[in-house]
Image (tube, rainbow, N blue to C red):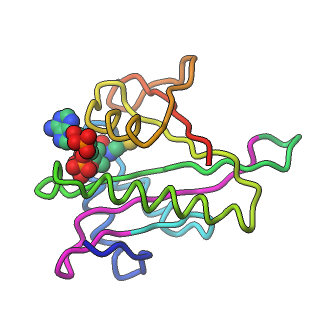
Amino acid sequence: MKIRGANPGDFAAIQEMAAVVFADYGDYGRIIPDWLAHDGVLTSVGEEEERLVGFSMVGFYRIDPTTVLYAADLLAIAVAPDAQGRGVGRQLLKHTIAKAEAARRRLPVRELRLSVAEPNLRALKLFRAAGFIELPGEHGRYDGGQRALHMARLL
Ligand SMILES: CC(C)(COP(=O)(O)OP(=O)(O)OC[C@H]1O[C@@H](n2cnc3c(N)ncnc32)[C@H](O)[C@@H]1OP(=O)(O)O)[C@@H](O)C(=O)NCCC(=O)NCCS
């Protein structure tokens, strides 16, 4: 698999994949175009023989108005259903962590954060293996009703 930055020619395929793989959690086909259009969001795609098999998106924001420190937010990571379970997600996550680490050259980014639905055991396993730790507290629910967990990993 080749991983590269997304370009506008990928946007329709990303939106379509998001609508399918996140269907249990909410209407991501509607949310994703805003993220794709945002200058502060880095989108990467995984490609096999010119077919898009996965994507990830990471955004950056100030931790709070009283500090100059930033957090990176893994907004989405997804693998096409017929490409899941054979390491694509793991490679995309590794690439995305490296991108967030590289952003430290320009921004004081301290950590990478994410939200994940409690029943999404495959994603939880992937994130824990990459060093993400669950944060305490209640973080609301997805539109699909699942409890949202927050995780973070120092960069
Ligand atoms: C979650 C997702 C990104 C993982 O990508 P993937 O390519 O399927 O996962 P990988 O093949 O890289 O495997 C990652 C880990 O998950 C585990 N895993 C794979 N298939 C699994 C399954 N059916 N059940 C439980 N764990 C599984 C693997 O054991 C692997 O860990 P390992 O390397 O120690 O074996 C992908 O399944 C996906 O797009 N799911 C739908 C969208 C989603 O939930 N995104 C995350 C939301 S925050």
In which quadrant of the rendered image does the N terminus lie? bottom left
Q: Is residue 52 above or below residue 91?
A: below
Residue shown at 30%/75% (left/top)? 2
Where is residue 119 shown, x and y percent of the image?
A: 29, 25
Q: Magenta region: which residues?
A: 45-63
Where is residue 111 shown, x and y percent of the image?
A: 64, 45
Where is residue 13 shown, x and y percent of the image?
A: 27, 70
Using the image as rendered, state which of residue 114 and residue 10 is in the foreground.
114
Q: Left or right: where does residue 67 sit relative to residue 101?
A: right
Q: Is residue 48 magenta?
A: yes
Q: Is residue 112 visible?
A: yes
View quadrant of ligand 1: top left
Q: Is residue 154 above or below residue 101?
A: above
Q: Is residue 21 visible?
A: no
Residue 99 is drawn in which quadrant? bottom right
**Secondary structure mostly taken by the magenta-highlighted segment of the chain:** strand
Residue 11 is drawn in which quadrant? bottom left
Q: Left or right: where does residue 132 sit relative to residue 26?
A: right
Q: Is residue 86 magenta?
A: no
Where is residue 56 shown, x and y percent of the image?
A: 40, 59
